[in-house]
Amino acid sequence: MVTAVQDSPLTSDEVLRFVARLQSSEFDIDAAAGIDLISALETIKCASVAVQAVVTDAVATTISNERRERGKPKPQWRIGIASQIGLARRESPNRGGTHLGLARALVHEMPHTLARLKAGELNEWRAMILARETACLTVDDRRTIDERLCTDPATLAGAGDRTIEGRARALANELDAASQVKRRAKAYAARRTSTRPAPESMGFFTVLTSMEKMVCMWATLRRDADTLINAGGETRTRDQIMADLVFERVTGAAAAQGPPVTVDIVIADSALLAGGSTSAYMHGYGDIPSDVARQLIRDTLDSETHVALRRLYAHPTSGALTAVESTSRAFPTALGRLIDLRDRTCRTPWCDAPIRHHDHIRPHSAGGRTSAENGAGLCAACNYAKEGEGWTAEALRDKRNARHRYILISPTGHTYDSSAPPMPVVELYNSTIENVTLEGLFDFDAA
């Protein structure tokens, strides 16, 4: 084994030169050599994560110390740092905060875990498991577990994710059982619901709650589904009935009646009226096939749901939504709706969190207008980070496709480009207003 001696600090240019060599390499090797190379590359990945953690902590410490020395209030010392870490790693601010938290734990409280990571004997996820399972402990107890599990490489050699999680949790219970009670209470306080898209225009609706409540809900749905199956004449499977029961009990409407709230679908007129194949966009979900959008609209027209067709004006070549303007400081409802449909999710690069705030790209206090051009949809975390010291943004005009675009500039001077996604904008379907003008207007069978 050859040990390299680093005489000077590692630079980004050196790393990128090595990356360029990897990118330009061609491989014509036997299977054994290939396995060796795969293992070596995995070690590189783990060591890179360890170095990232050390550098992440150093960056956060430098920024916070500089702010403290300038007399800034303590709550401002770390504002926006997680967002900078997330952008540097091409991830969301939320993930940036997770990486920052892991880095601080590894560097200051878990040196043996950091050493195993740097040696390539633990990967980032398993280091994250150890940090997560010891987060509720005192610093001394966390260091004890770090020492007992990671001082000797043989202790966790060959251990999988569940084994590592179980060992860390068992030691945590041994050292401080009361902390586990607090941890459970904290976890229960974070109970929530969430949604995410699934293939084939489906979606997941998830409830995070305590184990006993989850088991109770599941058992109740299964019991009632079995009752319906045994009633005779039922063609649905047990799983289908259980899914329909969730919808009916949450909304108070039968599954066959469709959604009882507003559902916006953006679809080109050629797709809606002439059977075109350009995909549509369902706000809050994402892209859906045009035939699915047409079927949703047809089903709604056949029901008692109120329907409206609203025209959205767009650039003739790019489809980009055109701007409207207001003299108000706050974004009016219609303008906010336009921004929501144009941006879809938070406009910060690599953050796809739901839009919570309509932000002035150039601040209103600095003369920024309340307009679609100067507006961007952001999640709460990104908007608060952008309000921190040193962040700036500038709206740009993209002459090629007219899509809305702006650049975000971090306190370290790094720039990040944000462009609104393309959209098939011509008509907007809204399931809340009168449908008398649409009745019989479209021949969907012909489409």
Image: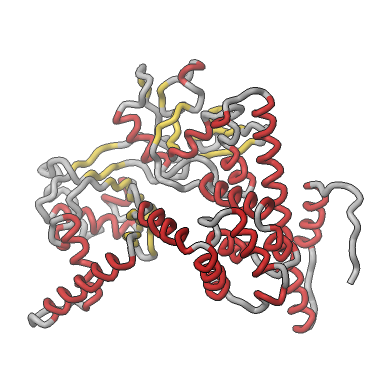
Q: Can residue 280 be seen in this view?
A: no
Q: Where is residue 406 in the image (x, y as percent from the top left)?
A: 54, 33
Q: Which colour scheme is used?
A: secondary structure
Would you place residue 123 above or below residue 345 in this image?
Answer: below
User: In this orientation, which residue lies closer to the viewer: 129 or 328?
Assistant: 129
Q: Position of residue 150 (x, y in %)?
A: 68, 68
- Which of the 4 image quadrants contains residue 344? top left
Would you place residue 193 above or below residue 309 in this image?
Answer: below
What residue is shown at x 20% (from left), y 47% (from top)?
A: 261
Tally the numbered discs. 0
User: In this orientation, which residue lies closer to the viewer: 176 or 150?
Assistant: 176
Q: Position of residue 11 (x, y in %)?
A: 81, 47
Q: Is residue 320 visible?
A: yes
Would you place residue 441 above or below residue 416 in this image?
Answer: below
What residue is shown at x 13% (from left), y 49% (from top)?
A: 305
What residue is shown at x 51% (from left), y 38% (from top)?
A: 401
Q: Please state if 289 lies on the left or on the right of 138 as rendered.
A: left
Would you place residue 300 above or below residue 156 in this image?
Answer: above
- Which of the 4 image quadrants contains residue 279? bottom left
Quarter of the figure with the N terminus: bottom right
What residue is shown at x 78% (from left), y 52% (from top)?
A: 16
User: In this orientation, which residue lies closer to the viewer: 38 or 436?
Assistant: 38
Q: Please state if 202 lies on the left or on the right of 381 as rendered.
A: left
Q: Position of residue 105 (x, y in %)?
A: 62, 53
Quarter of the figure with the C terminus: bottom left
Q: Please state if 273 lies on the left or on the right of 419 as rendered.
A: left
